[in-house]
Each structure stands twice: as C-alpha cells, then as structure tokens.
Image: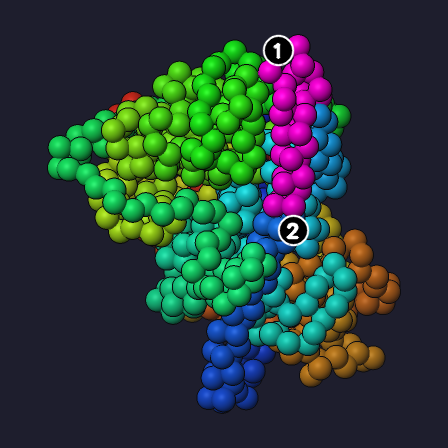
C-alpha cells in the first residue's frame, strides 16, 4: 500500500522514491497540495455567526455582485490592452513587410522582405519566451489545464499571482506580434482567473497592500467561485460569448457549482463583453456601439443554409476531426516527452521558440514563392494585400493567408468565395497549419490552441464544401478543435454566439459530439494529457467503476499523526518541522473502567489544520502565567495571513514558550467528516467530491482514529479508456516529477 498525504510531506513508499521515467503517465506528484473548501465551524466561527444579522447577509450578497461586476470590468480592460497593443504592433509589422514585398516580382528579391519579416517576428518572440522561461514559467501556454486543476481543488503554485498576469499579458501580445501559432483566447481564461482571484480578496500580497475590504471572501471556497466567474468572463471578452463563457466554466473548469453562481457568473460575463465592446467601439470611432465585436470577430454569416442531406457529411467531418484531433494529442505527447528529455535547459527553451518562429516565417515564404495563386484586388481578405508574383491590380492569395493575424485568417477561410483561394493553396496551407500548430503547442510561450485549431479545421472544412464554404468551414473548424480539446456544449454555444446565428447549433452539436466520441476512443484530450503529465491529482466526476470491493481501510494512510486537545507548544513545533502534513486529527484519551476493563482509548474530538497551528504559534496563543492572548483571537486573525501563511521555520519562539500549552478545542473543527473503515471507495469518492473535502478521517467501530483519506489516496485510482476497453490502474507517488 502506498503511503500518501495531502501535503507533500506524507511518508512515501520506497517505490515512490524511484526516478520517474520522463513522460510517465503512471505517477502522481506529491508537491501539489489541496485547497481547503470545508468551512471550519469552530467556536470562533460560531461566536462570529452569533454577532451577525440579516444586514450582514445582505451586505455580503451585495458585495458578491459588485465583485463580479468589477471582475468583468477589469478583465475587459486587460482584453482592451491586448487588443490595441496587437493591433498597433501588427499594423506596423505588416506594413513594413508589404513595403518590401511590393514591386518584388522575382524570386531573388525575396531576401529583403524575408529578412525583415524574420527580424520583426524574432524580436517579440524572443522577449515573450524570455519572460516565460526566466521570469514566470507559470504563464506558459493557455493556462487552461492549471485553472481546471485549481477549480478541482488543487493548489497550483503561482497560478493566480499578479506577476503571472503581467507576464501573461505581455507574453500573449508578443506571441501575436511574433507571428507564432498561438491564440490569445485561451490565455484570456487564465488572465480572467487571476483577476478574479485578486479582486475578490481586496488585497495584494505582491505589493503588501490591504484595502481592508472583502475580508469575508478570504476563504478557498469563496475564491473558487470567483475564479470560476473570472474564467467565464475571460471567454466572454475573447469570443464575445457570455453564455459560452458560462458553459465553458461549467463544462471544462468548475468542479463545484450552484444555482446562485450561475447567475452571478453570467452577469460578470455580460459586463466583461459589453465593457470591452463599448470601449473598442469608441476607440475605432463608433462611440456607443455596443454591438462592436470582441477580440475575436468571425464576421457576419448571412444567407447560409444547409439541408438534411448535409447531416451525414457533418457526422463524417466530426469523425475526421476526432481522428486528426486524437493524432494531434498523441503526437504532441511525444513532443512533450522529447522536450523534457532534450530541451531541458533555459537557453534551449528560448532557442526552440526562436527556431519555431523562424521556421514558421520560412515556410510561409516558401509557400508564397512556389505557389501561383493571384487574384484581383477587391477580393482580398486582408488589410495588407501583397502583390508578390502577381500582376498589377492583383494580390497573392497565399500571402493573404499568412500575413495577418490568425483570427483574420479564420475569418477569411469562413467567408470568402471559392474564387479567392485555389484548392492547391488551401491544401498546402492546411497541412502546414496542422503540423506548425502541433510543433508550436507546448513551447515556452503564452498562447493557446483554440484559434490555431479553428484555423486548421476551417481550411480542410473549406475543401469539403466548396459549394457552401461558410457552413462547411465552420463545421470543419469546430470538428478540429473539438477533436483536440473534446469541448462540446460550451464550444457549440461559443461558436453560435461568435457567428451570431443559432441556426448553426444543430450541425455544430452533431460534429462536436462525434469528434469527442471518436477522439475519446483513441486518447485523452490535450488538456487532460497535460494534467496527467504534470502529475496533478485531479479527481474525475465519478468514482472508478467496479470499485466497491475497495474499502476505507484499503485507502487510508496510517498511522496518523495526531494532537491532544491540550498540546505543548514544543510538541506542535517538533511535529510541524518533522512532518509536512496539512491536517491533524485531535484526540482525547479516555479510560472506560466499566466496559473495557480500564483500557485507555483515544477518541476523535476534531481536526486542526496546519495553517491554523501556524497562526496560533505566530500570535503566541499560549496558556501560561505571562500570556493572555486568548480573547484577542478571532476569525479575522486567521484571515489576515490568507492565502500565504508563514513557514514553521520562520516562526521565532523563546525557549520558555516551548513549555507552554495550547488548547486546540477552541480552534479545531469539532465536526470533521468521518467515515467507518468499512465504507467503500465509491461512497467515499462521492462524499469527497461533492463536499469538496481535503481530508476524511477514518474511524473504527469504537470511534478511534484508524487513518485518514486525502485527495491523492483517491486520485491514485486512474480509469483508462482506450480503443473501447476500460481498466483501472493504481498510480504511484513521487516527489521527483518535473
């Protein structure tokens, strides 16, 4: 049996100390802690509750609504900063490239525009990658897998820090300016989560500034709800899809939900979208136009229709998207393993980004050079048409696909008539787009897979339906992205809102469900694969099937480190320094002479958290002749240091302090969740998952503490579905995972 603990100091078996093979999916990392969603109803909490009235309830509820309002406003302004920065930077870049391209009709004159484009792409790519590698690695990628884990109850280090947000915003701007194949929509979800976590707390630990407001939200379960709303508001700002944002947070993000959170999240998403629209409309000379599109604009889908005979084709496209998506996830996993093995130095990580950037520019120039696809000006789907290789009054269609933002390329593939792009042009572009996206996703930059996936799918969808380009390009885009991410209902609504037509709901739903089923048959989604590689103990929605023969006494960690209700300071300090457990059962020894012939038994009295003990030691809440801090301790005392509590090594105590005692009965949770040692795994899992628990104490028939069950004890039972087969494997624990 593997010894595990929710905090990284649980004793591990010898097997868990083995070196983990690079790319292993059979290990869980012990470095990840859980969040404390359970409300600790100790004496301090009850005293605070008695002093409150209905005025407090109304004030707290009003504060929630106002917090969601400011979250929406803040996220929209972050989106505005990104949008305007990218627009200004890319306008300059594409104008420079066009300047050197125009008038160049021979192959030998491509050197100058190539070098200009290469330089203009490499500089921002270098800046963005250096920020990720040397300043804040947590800002890498879209951040969606990490946010998903946070909302599941895992404490991901540095995920919601202000520094992470700053690097994310600068990084995603550099990605767009550098011509890298990464979307800004995924990072907006991460940015929204960071903003929500910061605004909801009313303080900044980075600047050591406390506004003295919103103290009642300084709890993990409150922050979790705000982060869920922030992720939704990020989607709303990026796609102009508030309902899609809400459903994304529910489908892909949140593991805990309630009816009240639905309405507040929708409210914050609407505020985010319309604030962004109103500001950008004024910026572009249309003040007051609330219908101005957000960061992503697919344009108008007018006069598009489909027939019932198109439905089988949509199913087929879903199958194609599922197959190519599963292949994408499989090949990307191999690339990640390769990077872990060989691209393991900081300078190598930066160099890889530059190589990817240079390769992307080179491929685009080679395609422009060796294809001949000239069209008349007026059909150009870009603001910067390039003439290379074409006569006066014409533009190069291949250049139009490459020399604009990815969002613009998607829009071009959705809307332009069959005469704009030759079939050969679209085929070459589609193949290159697929493999560039595959190679790019996972390098050290701030960019997601959402828009590159849509772009690739829109290209091959256009090939399928040459007679009805708009609808088939849209279905192809949805199928490709659905096959990679396995998003269903949320992606359906996001694309419906982004296109402004509910008539696309049925074909989108059909192709996305098909893509998900086909993709799941072969592999996990790209996000789930990343989570497994990181070793995060993510809990699924349902317990492992056919696991009722596994009981609490098979799951639990034992023996358990416990405290007595009255414990010496010295013993508490010793245990906290020796072990890094997070939760400690509090027991009381009782002698029963009548029934047990004088035997002493230890009965469970409560549960005390490590963070609580740290606060008590910091404030010297001791029993002794010269100490009298008991009455000054309130719930606010514990909220002041949230969420970054001190380390036990940082607490300075006198030698005399160690001889004093602390009465834990006032501060412990006197009614923790407990289960009998005979309870089955499915029942424990459902209780743990539904209540958002961090610990469940296991007791025997005599109510004595027998062990403790934590997240990792449940997460180690992994369900594997592959090629129609289902199995359950038991994962190992390791503290040496990358």
Q: Quadrant of residue 472?
A: top left
Q: Quadrant of residue 548?
A: top left
Residue 124 versus residue 688 in the image, above or below: above
Q: Disc 1 and disc 2: Cα gap in Å?
A: 44 Å
Label 2 CA crowd tier, 10 Å (few <14, some 14–19, many 20+): many
Residue 319 in the figure: left or right of residue 280:
left
Q: Which residues are drawn in magenta?
A: 86-115
- Foreground tag (1 vs 2): 1
Q: Which residue is mark 1?
A: 107
- Dot 2 falls on a residue whose secondary structure is helix
Question: Of 609 and 56, which appears nearest the observer?
Answer: 56
**Looking at the picture, how far across and down is residue 112, in whole percent?**
71, 19
Q: Which residue is mark 2?
A: 165
Label 1 CA crowd tier, 10 Å (few <14, some 14–19, many 20+): few
Quarter of the rendering occupied by the C terminus = top right
Could you tell me what secondary structure mostly forms the magenta stretch? Answer: helix
- The residue at the point 70 percent across, 42 percent down is 136
Question: Of 692 and 528, which appears nearest the observer?
Answer: 528
**Looking at the picture, how far across and down is residue 560, in whole percent?**
55, 50
- The residue at the point 17 percent across, 34 percent down is 311
Residue 331 in the figure: left or right of residue 631:
left
The label shown at residue 725 is: none
Residue 261 versus residue 193 in the image, above or below: below
**Looking at the picture, how far across and down is residue 721, in whole percent?**
33, 29
Q: Is residue 227 visible in the rendered structure shown here?
A: no
């Amino acid at each position: 049996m593997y010894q595990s603990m929710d905090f990284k100091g649980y004793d591990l078996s010898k097997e868990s100390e083995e070196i983990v093979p690079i790319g292993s999916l059979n290990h869980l990392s012990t470095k990840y802690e859980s969040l404390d969603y359970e409300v600790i109803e100790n004496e301090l909490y009850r005293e605070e509750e008695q002093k409150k009235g209905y005025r407090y309830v109304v004030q707290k509820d009003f504060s929630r609504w106002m917090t969601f309002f400011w979250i929406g406003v803040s996220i929209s302004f972050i989106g505005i900063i990104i949008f305007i920065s990218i627009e200004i930077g890319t306008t300059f870049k594409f104008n420079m490239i066009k300047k050197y391209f125009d008038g160049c009709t021979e192959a030998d004159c491509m050197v100058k525009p190539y070098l200009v484009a290469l330089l203009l792409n490499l500089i921002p790519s270098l800046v963005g990658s250096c920020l990720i590698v040397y300043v804040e690695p947590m800002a890498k990628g879209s951040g969606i897998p990490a946010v998903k884990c946070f909302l599941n109850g895992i404490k991901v280090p540095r995920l919601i820090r202000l520094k992470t947000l700053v690097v994310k915003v600068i990084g995603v701007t550099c990605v767009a300016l550098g011509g890298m194949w990464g979307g800004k929509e995924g990072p907006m979800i991460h940015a929204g989560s960071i903003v929500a976590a910061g605004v909801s707390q009313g303080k900044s630990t980075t600047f050591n500034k406390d506004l003295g407001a919103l103290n009642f939200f300084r709890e993990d379960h409150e922050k979790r709800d705000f982060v869920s709303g922030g992720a939704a508001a990020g989607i709303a700002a990026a796609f102009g899809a508030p309902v899609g944002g809400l459903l994304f947070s529910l489908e892909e993000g949140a593991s805990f939900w309630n009816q009240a959170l639905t309405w507040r999240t929708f409210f914050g998403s609407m505020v985010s979208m319309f604030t962004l629209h109103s500001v950008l409309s004024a910026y572009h000379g249309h003040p007051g136009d609330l219908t101005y599109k957000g960061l992503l604009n697919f344009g108008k889908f007018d006069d598009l229709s489909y027939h019932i005979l198109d439905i089988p084709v949509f199913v087929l496209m879903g199958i194609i998207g599922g197959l190519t998506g599963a292949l994408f996830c499989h090949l990307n996993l191999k690339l990640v393993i390769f990077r872990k093995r060989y691209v393991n130095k900081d300078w190598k990580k930066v160099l890889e980004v530059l190589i990817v950037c240079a390769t992307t520019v080179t491929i685009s120039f080679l395609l422009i050079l060796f294809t001949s696809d000239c069209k008349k000006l007026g059909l150009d789907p870009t603001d910067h048409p390039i003439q290379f290789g074409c006569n006066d009054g014409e533009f190069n269609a291949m250049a139009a696909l490459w020399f604009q933002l990815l969002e613009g390329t998607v829009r071009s593939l959705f809307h332009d008539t069959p005469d704009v792009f030759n079939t050969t042009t679209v085929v070459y572009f589609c193949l290159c787009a697929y493999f560039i996206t595959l190679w790019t996703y996972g390098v050290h930059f701030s960019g997601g897979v959402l828009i590159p996936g849509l772009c690739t799918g829109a290209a091959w969808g256009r090939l399928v339906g040459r007679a009805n380009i708009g609808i088939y390009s849209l279905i192809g885009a949805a199928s490709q992205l659905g096959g990679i991410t396995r998003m269903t209902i949320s992606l359906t609504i996001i694309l419906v809102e982004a296109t402004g037509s509910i008539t696309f709901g049925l074909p989108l739903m059909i192709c996305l469900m098909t893509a998900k089923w086909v993709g799941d048959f072969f592999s996990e989604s790209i996000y789930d694969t990343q989570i497994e590689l990181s070793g995060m103990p993510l809990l699924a929605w349902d317990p492992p099937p056919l696991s009722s023969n596994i009981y609490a006494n098979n799951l639990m960690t034992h023996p358990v480190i416990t405290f007595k209700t009255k414990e010496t300071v010295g013993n508490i300090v010793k245990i906290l320094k020796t072990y890094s457990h997070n939760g400690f059962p509090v027991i009381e020894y009782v002698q029963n002479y009548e029934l047990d012939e004088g035997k002493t038994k230890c009965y469970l009295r409560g549960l005390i958290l490590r963070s609580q003990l740290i606060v008590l030691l910091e404030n010297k809440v001791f029993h002794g002749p010269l100490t009298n801090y008991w009455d000054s301790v309130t719930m606010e005392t514990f909220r002041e240091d949230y969420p970054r509590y001190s380390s036990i090594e940082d607490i300075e105590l006198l030698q005399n302090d160690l001889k004093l005692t602390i009465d834990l009965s006032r501060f412990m949770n006197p009614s923790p969740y407990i289960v009998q040692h005979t309870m089955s795994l499915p029942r424990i899992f459902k209780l743990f998952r539904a209540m958002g628990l961090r610990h469940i104490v296991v007791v025997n028939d005599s109510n004595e503490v027998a062990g403790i069950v934590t997240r990792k004890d449940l997460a180690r039972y992994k369900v594997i579905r592959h090629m129609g087969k289902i199995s359950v494997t038991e994962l190992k624990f390791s503290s040496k995972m990358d």
